[in-house]
Image (spheres, rainbow, N blue to C red):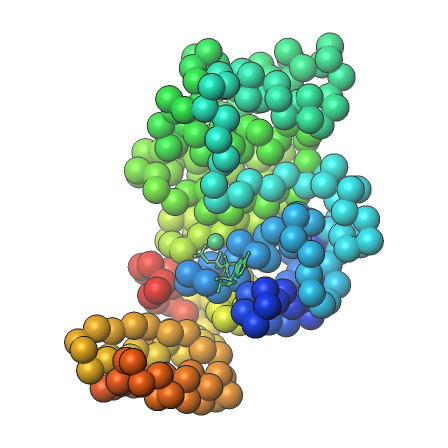
Amino acid sequence: MNALSMSGVVKRYGSTVAVAGLDLDVAAGSLLGLIGPNGAGKSTTLAMAATLTRATEGSIEVLGVDAIAEPREVRRRVGFMPDQMGFYDDMTVDDYLLFFADAHEIPRKERPALIDNLLELVELGPLRERPVAALSRGQSQRLGIGRVLVHDPELLLLDEPASGLDPVARADLLDLLRQLRDLGKTIVISTHILSELEPICTEVAVMAAGRVVAIGAPDELRTEPDPTRTIQVRFADGTGETFTVVDDEEQEALLRRLVADDSRPVLEFERTHRGLAALFEREVAE
Ligand SMILES: Nc1ncnc2c1ncn2[C@@H]1O[C@H](COP(=O)(O)OP(=O)(O)OP(=O)(O)O)[C@@H](O)[C@H]1O
Ligand SMILES: [Mg+2]
């Protein structure tokens, strides 16, 4: 069974196309890394799967439930961690988890044991009295994961949980994700830097310009040609910018747009070829 199935999904904000006809199937039990450059549509995709943003077109099924028709049912069974935690500065770690236990209507008498278990899992027991505002980035990412586990969801959607972590905090996070995977959770996790998450991913989906352009096991993808094109542009004023397009049509449109912009004359427009293997080696070009 698929834990998540998105088909022909489009999301427009006015004239901006954030997601442009996306297809994505995530088998139950996978740990899928969603990788792509800034603006590829990763956050929008996760937010639509979590039913926090409505798709403009297309269909989304989460754990066999139509997410567009039955968002409440989906929210009960999904844990979504946004890339920003929100501000609950005055709360302690304990209060913070209690707040979400309350929001999810966990019976009062079950809360103490639940919170003890979660704190043990995310290794924040000793910090339970500490204000949320006083946590380090790694601690606060772990608390964010504790928070999405409060209602014991089957599918976790985590937006950039590893960003900004030092190597030790990142290794702790990978351990935690591995444990959750072993508990049978399906996990979708977005990242700019695949190499950081690759050791735990069972699958990788590459996003560019609002679509999934490649999907497969990390080892399969490594040897495939890159279906995206990276266009490097140098402007007459000495500045440069890198764009990602997926086909001739998009490349033509980009060139037309750049040439039409008189405020920034173009000096060079170069298409560079990099295999998908490059994704495994370093950060995706922005
Ligand atoms: N609320 C919004 N209103 C208007 N445009 C938006 C909104 N949210 C996202 N976008 C646009 O949609 C596109 C995709 O954004 P999204 O945040 O999904 O990308 P991303 O892959 O998560 O990028 P990043 O790596 O920077 O987090 C971007 O061009 C963005 O500017
Ligand atoms: Mg994002």
Q: Position of residue 38 (x, y in %)?
A: 42, 61
Residue at the image position 47 percent from the left and 41 percent from the top: 84
Work out whether residue 2 or residue 7 is closer to the camera in this orientation and state it.
Answer: 7
Q: Is 130 placed above or below 149 here?
A: above
The reply to whether residue 36 is in sight is: yes
Q: Position of residue 20 (x, y in %)?
A: 59, 71
To which quarter of the image does residue 22 belong? bottom right
To which quarter of the image does residue 131 belong? top left
Q: Is 181 placed above or below 122 here?
A: below
Q: Residue furthest front?
A: 263
Horizontally, is 165 left or right of 203 in the view?
Answer: left
Q: Position of residue 173 (x, y in %)?
A: 44, 35
Q: Position of residue 219 (x, y in %)?
A: 46, 62
The reply to whether residue 125 is in sight is: no
Residue at the image position 69 percent from the left and 26 percent from the top: 103
Q: Is 110 placed above or below 18 here?
A: above
Residue at the image position 31 percent from the left and 59 percent from the top: 282
Residue at the image position 37 percent from the left and 74 percent from the top: 243
Quadrant that contains the C terminus: bottom left
Work out whether residue 89 or residue 95 is closer to the camera in this orientation and state it.
Answer: 89
Q: Is 159 placed above or below 231 here?
A: above
